[in-house]
Amino acid sequence: MPPAESAAAPAVEFAIQKRRVRFLGLTLDECIKLFFGGNAVVSIVVLTLITYFLFREGAGFFGQNRVNLQVYRQAGLEYVDYLRRQADDHTALTRYLADVRLRTVQHHTRTSGKSLEEANAALTEFDVYVERYSAAIDPLRTMVGELSEVASAIKTKFIVNEDKKEERRQLLAEGKMAEAARVAIDRVDFEAELRPIRAGFPAYRTLNRELSSTLTQLAGNIPALPVPELQQRMERFAVLSREYVGTFPEIERSLESWDHNAPISASQAFSSFLFGRQWLTASFWQDWYGIIPLLIGSLLVSLVALALAVPLGVGAAIYVNQIATPLEQKLIKPCIEFISAIPSVVLGFFGIAVLGQLLRNLSQSPALAWVPGFPYSERLNILTAGCLLALIAVPTIFTLAEDALNNVPRAFKEASFALGASRLQTTMRIIVPASLSGIISAVLLGLGRVIGETMVVLLCAGNRIAIPDFTQGFAFIVEPVHTMTGIIAQEMGEVVRGSIHYRALFVVGLVLFLLSLLINFGAQKIVRRYRISVG
Amino acid sequence: MEPPAATSPGPAGPASLRRPATAPGATAPTQAGAVPTTHPVIDIENLDFYYGASQALHDISLSIDHHRVTAFIGPSGCGKSTLLRCLNRMNDLIDGTRVGRGRIRVHGVDINQPDVDVIELRKRVGMVFQKSNPFPKSIYENITYGLRLQGVKDKARLDEVVERSLRGAALWEEVKDRLHESGLGLSGGQQQRLCIARAIAVEPEVILMDEPCSALDPVATAKVEELIQDLRSKYCIVIVTHNMQQAARCSDRTAFFYLGRLIEYADTRDIFTNPANPQTEAYVSGRFG
Ligand SMILES: Nc1ncnc2c1ncn2[C@@H]1O[C@H](COP(=O)(O)OP(=O)(O)OP(=O)(O)O)[C@@H](O)[C@H]1O
Ligand SMILES: [Mg+2]
């Protein structure tokens, strides 16, 4: 018997070894390890690659932008823009007058009960004044028009030359020496080209003096208006007008000292992006890549979204965690989490088709006239996009805040009840403060989620690239804006690869990336501190 | 007599039974002769208690006296905590719990009636938990929490209560310079005394303590026990403990539970020296569980 047993034992062991599965010489365990390890490595590699790619594509932008700004200066566009700005400031004043006229007409028709004709007739004197005021700028406008053409021509010449250089470079690279030599390249002599522009300076001076005296005279003779309130507006106008005239000498000085060869520093290329208030592409005159309007757009939409989502999400979390019956919990939780399953394009669609219209109709109801900015006519704006984004942020905030509330040790709750606290007191004085950092980090992560959201803002924010007008208080929330995510999605498909516009979009993406990173980092920091404080 | 049972009440005798020693009776009325006169505060009659479908307490009847320390002892899972938590209705916080047959009366009022204000009840019947659980707030705020809930805002009154409660919990000297630091920064024993101070700050009549010393070292335990002796003159104290010596040292009456039933309830000295029930004897002498 013993010998038979000892003989059987190794045979069994042998059989086990034979059955062991091997793929490419690896055991199953090793395969599993490789699979999961591989996944982890892949995600790290992908993240690194994306970061690297963003930086590489974006970095070229600043060099190109420097050239862009250099040409703007060398071709005299900058010079012409001094004059153009002067003319535009005047237009703003004319618009102010038009506004006062509108108010006066309203006063006549509503308060004094005159007909429209009578109201207009009463304003003849005013209209003559406006006429004189706006006509005063005509000579400057003409001059701007002429100089613009010259400057544009210089710029075009330069660009054509650059294109030719590029062509020759390509030919050389292909080894076609003969063809390359045949590509004729003129050197652009900016000094000479700019001469006609500079030659206009004495004429500008005389023109300016005339303009200045006309406006000063007009500012001293404002027409009388029927009500003190309107009269005050006109006096304000006179002040503005004088201030405007006061800027003329400064403009002249800038023009005189203007040097087309003054170099553009690297920091200017940088700051014109980071602090630039204009994002203007594919224009006939000059392209500007300033991120401020997009950044402000993104932030405003996100803040409006958070203002709505935080009370909703945190409130729902508190309710579900502290007050709801188990049945309610079972019902509410999946419902809120289900919101995050709605594709954002569907939400955007809903925003355009339903919510935008609904909000606009609401805004026109007299009962809501006290809301800043109401009534409004732009269907797609910060408010519409913010409402929809709030819907996207609510599940994130809700889930994370609920977790944070859940993590508050049960002992705190019991201690509070044992001291005679009501449910509400326990929630507000113990549970919420103890989970506050968790809730804050939930809100931050919601912000991160919202700021990166693309489809909804692209469809519903109105896509007007402009910094909203903050002078009217909260009325800005019904203005259309464009966002960082929206602009990338909208323009990336149309730009030429490697062009300055293309690279500018990458830098916008980079800013977005860094912003999200910062928000996530902040959230993690807060959570970590929270753990320590409770543990 | 087994050595543990014989020796354990030995040192405790003078401490816990000092006053009744003049009239060594077995029943409450005889103890009324003690300096703080006593009367039953809590009356439990034929109590059944259920966690969902499973019954945790069977037909419990006992009455708890004022100015006395009553100890609940018994093997793990026998229902001591459950009974204790019934006394201020902390079990309401657990879903699916219910009192079946029976009644608990505090000062004659059935606390399980729907018209009873649980908040008011819990103000009168305070609780100290097994694991110290100060709020993540300052020491000062921990102690004033209960009063603030009641709307007390007067700074002078709060200050006074903080000092009185901390002195009452024998913690004042240790923390008087750091009242505004976090309560979580105290040692385990200090935290437990802080919780006791927090409980007495609202001036309850009854203090329920669920294994208050189980996480403490002998020195801290001694302090808490001393404290319990001091508190006895003012409060009615119920303490759950696994430590036989502790029960013998600092309680006047002891109830022994087993499998959700009250096996024996008598003067502590009798439980430890002369138990009527063989199960009790086996348990207190350590031959059991
Ligand atoms: N939340 C609960 N849900 C269901 N059953 C519970 C719950 N809490 C306690 N029980 C049960 O009730 C019985 C009594 O438990 P209890 O906690 O009162 O025991 P105990 O005497 O305090 O024990 P220990 O000395 O270990 O603290 C046990 O059988 C336990 O399993
Ligand atoms: Mg227990």
Image (cartoon, coloured by chain):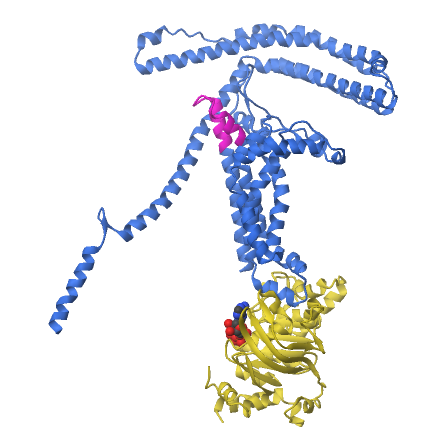
Chain colours: A blue, B yellow
Residue B219 visible, this orientation = yes
Please tell me in which quadrant of the rendered image residue A244 appears: top right
Residue at horizontal 80 percent and vertical 10 percent from the top: A128
Q: Is the magenta region chiefly helix, strand or loop?
A: helix
Percent from the top left, x then y, of residue A472?
72, 31
Residue at horizontal 56 percent and vertical 26 percent from the top: A290
Please tell me in which quadrant of the rendered image residue A384 appears: top right
Q: Nearer the viewer, residue B220 or B79?
A: B79
Magenta region includes residue A219 = no
Q: In which quarter of the image is the N terminus of chain A?
A: bottom left
In the depicted structure, whether residue A461 falls above or below residue B2? above
Q: Which of A373 and A257 is in front in this view?
A: A373
In the depicted structure, whether residue A335 falls above or below residue A235? below
Percent from the top left, x then y, of residue B1?
49, 94
Percent from the top left, x then y, of residue B221?
56, 77
Q: Which of B113 and A36 is in front in this view?
A: B113
Q: Give the range drawn in magenta.
A: A485-509
Direction left: furthest residue: A3
Q: Nearer the viewer, residue A61 or A357?
A: A357
Percent from the top left, x then y, of residue A206?
70, 7
Residue at horizontal 50 percent and vertical 22 percent from the top: A66
In the depicted structure, whether residue A90 falls above or below residue B119? above
Q: How many marks?
A: 0
* Left or right: where A340 falls relative to A11: right
Residue A241 visible, this orientation = no
* Left or right: where A349 falls relative to A44: right
